Amino acid sequence: MEFIYQEESEIPGSELLALYESVGWTAYTSDHERLVQAIKNSSYVLTARVNSQLIGLARTLSDDVSIMYLQDVLVSPLYQRKGVGRALLERCLSRFEHVRQKVLLTDNRPEQKAFYHSLGFHNVGELENIELNAFVRYEGIELS
């Protein structure tokens, strides 16, 4: 099976919806138009395809100098654990290699933490040699 990786920003909404629904990301799929607009407005969108079918996506927001924020990395459950997510992320990191800060938010599941740690990311709450804080604000969600 050959995975094709390519930069894309004009992805049909039906393909995006199917991919995001396949991983259960309903916060994105509840408003189809906003999902399409979010992809279009991203700095860099990389897709993975098999036989022209969208099976993975990574997207970033960046000023291309000091910060790259990794917003999404998702792979259809049928293709997970086959190196697709790693390949997408490695290609994003390569594209923004010259950028000083690379940041992301992710779930607190052990497999998520292990995956990102294996790619050089560190949880700011676990750092000892540098004092950092990370702050987040979500609209419409009560955080505690």
Image (spheres, rainbow, N blue to C red):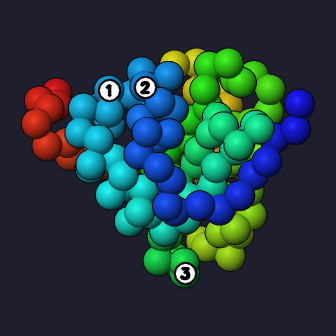
Q: Residue at x 89, y 31 (%)?
A: 1
Element carrying mark 3: loop
Which percent across, then down, holds residue 124?
48, 44
- Residue at mark 1: 26
Q: Residue at x 77, y 38 (%)?
A: 51
Q: Nearer the viewer, mark 3 or mark 2?
A: 2
- Residue at mark 2: 21
Element carrying mark 2: helix
**Kind of residue sitting beneath label 3:** Val
Please identify the quarter of the rendering in which residue 91 is found.
bottom right
**Sequence-first tag of 3 and 1:** 1
- Give me the C-alpha separation between circle 1 and circle 2: 7 Å
Q: Residue at x 62, y 39 (%)?
A: 54
Q: Is residue 125 visible?
A: no
**Kind of residue sitting beneath label 1:** Thr
Up-down relation of residue 56 to residue 102 (above or below): above
Give neighbour class at mark 3: few <14, some 14-19, many 20+ (Cα, 10 Å).
few
Which percent across, then down, holds residue 98?
68, 76
**Sequence-first tag of 1 and 2:** 2
Q: Nearer the viewer, residue 111 or 85?
A: 85
Residues at discs 1 and 2 in contact (Cβ within 8 Å): yes
Element carrying mark 1: helix
- Residue at mark 3: 65
**Sequence-first tag of 3 and 2:** 2
Residues at discs 3 and 1 in contact (Cβ within 8 Å): no
Q: Nearer the viewer, residue 101 or 9?
A: 9
